[in-house]
Amino acid sequence: MTTSPRRAGTLMSLEMAGQPAVLARLAGRAATDMAAVRKLTPGGLAGVVFVARGSSDNAALFGRYLAELSSGRPAGLASPSLYTRYRAKVDWRGYVAVALSQSGETPEIISTCSAVRDAGATVIGITNEPGSLLAEVSDLVLSTDAGAERAVPATKTMTAQMLLVATVAAGLAGQEYGPDFARLPAAVESILADPEAADELAARWRDIDRLVVTGRGLAYATALEVALKIKETTGILAEGISAADLRHGPIATAYAGSPVLLIDAGGPAAADTRELAEQLHDRGAQATFLQVPANLPEPAQAIAAVVRGQQLARSLAIARGIDPDSPAGLTKVTPTT
């Protein structure tokens, strides 16, 4: 599918441009959201499980890291097939299930939430459609409040979900909402105003057919999301992988000349990513760091890096003659059951 570069990605660009305002809105109401989460958190919290698919699954992984760090309780990702196909019978008393669905209508997310709620879980729904079916199976609904998203690749709803799962994680732990995200909207605005780095990398990688995207810790979720955006918009086989896993058997895929995109969000895992970059350079791979502001707290930097990845995905698609607003074979809502 080819299209005019002048018109390609118009919707995606407009929706990306809305992210600073959306993130500022969510940060502004964070104290209220956290109080609502605290109010319904079970005494003696047993654990936290995130329920999601697609881009939302990457936000869920981000939340899984933050929830376990902040609450001191185990956190993980649910497997919806256990409930929609295997009809698992599980005792969910004492658990909080956090369900993410941009549309709030994905059948298997609704079914899974209904099952775990009936089995004793408290369900928090995160969606861009607070009047959707997800609300009916949730004890608390937090809206991403991002407005209509018409381009197929999720942009503003994705970063909004990431900020909301951070809010939920802090609320579960009874923490005060700190300064971690105060500078995020301005940082995202600065990224959006400076597409040159993404355009230059897209021009260099226009003809690639495969790409490895890697990060560790909170940046792992970012790597998965950036890889997904590139796959969705360009058709390039982009694989998101943990920097720790890449250093094992998969390092064989990083041969001389092969492109590797590294995500550095700072924090305790950053040194591992820098060591991996040296190893990749020694192998002759085209190892390139995604350029993001480096003066942000790690969770905010991970979200900001997603926005730079959106820029790269859009630029790569246009460079390849593809309209990222409506990639071939994809729809806005995928009705998995």
Image: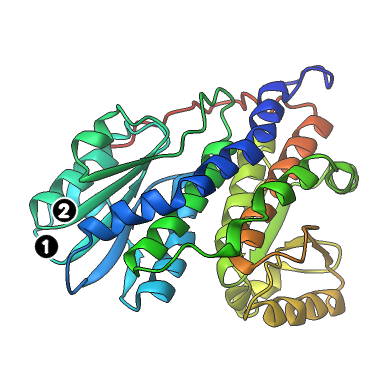
The residue wearing badge 2 is 116
Tell me if residue 38 comes above or below residue 196 in the rendering.
below
Residue 212: image tag:
none
Does residue 257 appear in the picture of this structure?
Answer: yes
Numbered mark located on residue 90 in the image: 1
| Image point (41%, 64%), residue name | 170
Q: Is residue 298 left or right of residue 33?
A: right
- Residue for point 59% across, 47% down: 228
Three-letter code, disc 1: Val
The Cα–Cα distance between marks 2 and 1, rounded to whole angstroms, is 8 Å
Q: Secondary structure at mark 2?
A: helix
Along the horizontal axis of the image, is 210 left or right of 180? right
**Disc 1 packing (10 Å; few <14; some 14–19; many ≥20):** few
Label 2 environment density (alpha carbons within 10 Å; few <14, some 14–19, many ≥20): many
The type of residue carrying mark 2 is: Val
Q: Quadrant of the C terminus?
A: top left
Q: x and y percent of residue 186 in the render?
A: 72, 48
Numbered disc 1: secondary structure: loop
Q: Which residue: 45% across, 51% down? A: 30
Q: Nearer the viewer, mark 2 or mark 1?
A: 2
The colouring scheme, among rainbow, by chain, secondary structure or one colour, is: rainbow
Which residue is rendered at x = 65% and y = 67% of the image? Answer: 297
Looking at the image, residue 90 lies above or below residue 123: below
Q: Is residue 249 above or below residue 144?
A: below
Coordinates of residue 233 in the picture (x, y in percent): 66, 35
N-term-proximal mark, 2 vs 1 = 1
Nearer to me, 288 or 310: 310
Quadrant containing the N terminus in the rendered view: top right
Q: Is residue 79 visible?
A: no
Q: Position of residue 261 (x, y in %)?
A: 75, 60
Are the two marked residues, 2 and 1, in contact with CB atoms closer than 8 angstroms?
Answer: yes
